[in-house]
Every structure is written in structure tokens, then in C-alpha cells.
Image (cartoon, rainbow, N blue to C red):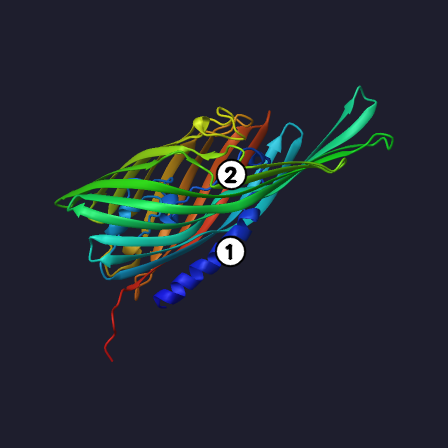
Amino acid sequence: MNLKRYILVVLVAMMAIGACAQNATSSPTSRFGYGELNANLPNAYRAMGGVGIGMRSNKVINSAQPASYTACDSMTFMFDIAGSVLYTNYSDSYGQTNKANGNLEYMTIQFPIWRQHIAMSLGVTPYSAVGYNFALTDSINSDYYYSQAYRGNGGFTQVYGGLSVNICNWVALGVNAYYMFGNIEQTRSLSFTDAMMDSVQMVEKLRANSLRLRYGVQLFHTFGQHTVNLGALFENKQPFSRMDYEQIEMTTADTISMINAGFDMPMMYGVGLSYAYANRLVIGADYMCHDWANANYFGQMKTLKQRHRWAIGAEYCNDPTSRKYVDQVYWRLGVNYTTAYTNQYNEAEWGVGLGVGFPLRTTGTVINATVEYGKRGNKNVLSENYMRLVINASISEYWFFKRKL
């Protein structure tokens, strides 16, 4: 497959991911803020608990860390596509229910521009997802019974282009430029069993697009068979380029519309460290903070709060050069802990990842499968237990290499 075909596939995926993001979650908590935020990590690193800031490999497109692109082989073009299936159990004091969702996770490409000094990556990933449909019933003094219904769908998708430069043998700098777009529609309704009482329905619509930059740096050095990488990321707080908000009172047909009503993308920073031994063992650890507390949301700060994420994980391959296939297989394990970024739902989330990578013998392709188990909340409010299966194909081909007949 040539470069034009890869780029065409990514452009088609941009539309597909935008559509799939509406079916990426069924969580009632996605009604808060901008919905559930995507990890935006390659599948191989999701199995390692979601590390990535300090990770540097010529077998993985690490779109989360733009400084890592120059780790690619100077003659190799890479293409990565991933999809997932999510199964979630929701429970509270009233009962429980199960939901299943599917999603196209991401599509990315990476290629060298000048030897091992400059490299580039392009891709499309979901940023957030909203998807819920639930109802509550109650009464006023046991006289007037009513039902409250909540529905929401949509999300934001981002397209990125990134460039990485090795400024010396042990320092790499990188930058990603993101264009984010999408919409969220949420509906609230109140209805009474008494026909004499009027029902009320409210529809809220958010439509947005935004441009922002992510800066990355990695310091790396090899001591014999030991390699140490230290990485860092930074994004400045950035107002949305355009954010339209519309609130429609369906009963009275009253409409409130606001354009650019004070919405920001938060400042983000993170650090990561990884250690590799002889292409067999890799251990990584990350910390990341999204400063939502100081980002405008409906023109106000402190409506949201800081989101912190810790992750640690490991990968093991017995012998990548062995003739025995089982020795070439990659085994991965990791854990993470993430705090909530909305004040309305204050429950932290923890997760465990377990993955395996199957290299194809005759090509540079690796098929990765990851199972993630996670939990957040409690039955007094809402408890969520989920199991996610993510499968991706990481394809590597020679760059500008003509085969001899």
C-alpha cells in the first residue's frame, strides 16, 4: 500500500471515528463536562497501564508524545489502526444493568523525513464521547408522580499532525498540532402522570472546533544493553476557536444562543520515565495533569477541576531474534489511577491492562490485543465496572524501497 492510499484511509477514518464516538459509551456520567475523555494512546501502551510520555520505540507510533517520532527506522513507513469493544456493568442502590459499545479507537501513520533526524506523524483520534439514556421516577408528597429523563449523544474528534527533530544524539523535540471538532446534544425532560400538569423538555447543543499545540521533549541514552528515557509534555491553555451553545425550551419554544461563550482547553503537563533492557524488558511510569480548574467553562473557572493520572507498566519479550515464535511474543501488564475532572461526579477511576503482541513472521506487522478492566464510583451514587477489548494492527513497510525483480 502506498502513501496516497494510507492518507486516504486516514481521511475516511476521520469521518468514521466522528460517527463511532457517539457509540463509544453508555455511561450516565458522560453527561458532565465534555463527556468521557479518551486516553489517546497506542494500544501497546494501553496494555502497559497507559504509559507513553517516556516511551520511545521504533515499533509503536506514540502519538501522545510528539518527541518520540524520530525513534522510527529511517527506511520504515508505519500505519496503525485500532478498534475496541466495551462491556460495562452499571449499578446503584436501585439495581443494575449491562451495556455494550463498540468504537474505532484511532488511525495513525508515521514516516521519516530526513534519516533519523526528522520524522512526522499524522492521524485521527476521538477526544471525548457522550452517550447516555436513563430515567428517574419520584413523587411530590406521594400525590404527584413524575419522571425525569436524560439523553445525550455526540463527542469531539481530533485530527493531528506532528513533527519530531533530534537536535543531538540524546535529545529529541516534538510538536503536535491538533484540530478538534464535534458536537454534543443533551436532552432533559420532566413529565407528570397527571395530565393536568404540563411536561417540560430542554435541549442543549454544543458545537465546537479548536486548534491547539502540544510540545514534547525526550532525553535518552544507552549504556550497553540498558536504555533510559525521560520525557515531558506541555500544552498551554487555549480558548476554543469557536464554541456555539444553544438551549431550547421545547415547551415554550424559547431559545438561548451563545457564540464563543467562554470555553477553554486546559493547560496540560506531564512527565514520564522508561527503562529498557536489551530489547527484551521495558518498564515505564507516567504522571499527567490537566488543569481544568483554571479553564473557562460557560465563562466561569472552577466549574471543573484538575484531572490527575498516574500509570505504570511493563513489557517483556523473551527473545525477539529467536527462531521460536513464542519467544518473539510481547507480553504487557500495567495499572493506572485517574481522578475525575467534573465536580458533579467526583469518583476516581482505576484500571488494569493486560496485553499480548503477535509479530507476523514475514513482515514488520504486529497484532496487539489488550484487555482493560476498570472500576469507578460506588453503589451509593453509581458504580461502573467495565471490560474493554482493544485490537490493533501496527503495519511497517519499507519507505521508498524498490523491490528487485
- 137 on left or right of 115: right
Look at the image and tell me in which quarter the C terminus lies.
bottom left
Of pointers 2 and 1, the one earlier in the residue sequence: 1
Local packing at callout 1 (Cα closer than 10 Å; few below 14, some 14-19, many 20+) is few
Residue at (42, 48) in percent of width and height: 370
Question: Can the viewer see residue 155 in this picture?
Answer: no
The relative height of residue 401 versus residue 164 in the rendered view (above or below) is below
Residue at (38, 39) in percent of width and height: 49
Look at the image and tell me in which quarter the N terminus lies.
bottom left
Residue 105: % across, % down: 46, 50
Q: Confirm or deny contact between disc 2 and disc 1 (CB under 8 A).
A: no
Q: Quarter of the image holding residue 218?
A: top left
Instruction: Give the farthest residue toward the top.
Output: 141
* Amino acid, disc 2: Glu
Which of 321/196 is in front?
Answer: 196
- On residue 15, the disc is 1
Which of 40/350 is in front?
Answer: 40
Residue at (40, 53) in percent of width and height: 123
The relative height of residue 338 versus residue 360 in the rendered view (above or below) is above
* Amino acid, disc 1: Met
Residue 80: % across, % down: 38, 56
Residue named by callout 2:
36
- 149 on left or right of 391: right
Residue 168: % across, % down: 15, 46
Instruction: Give the farthest residue toward the bottom.
Output: 405
- 74 on left or right of 24: left
SS for tag 2? strand
Residue 332: % across, % down: 34, 45
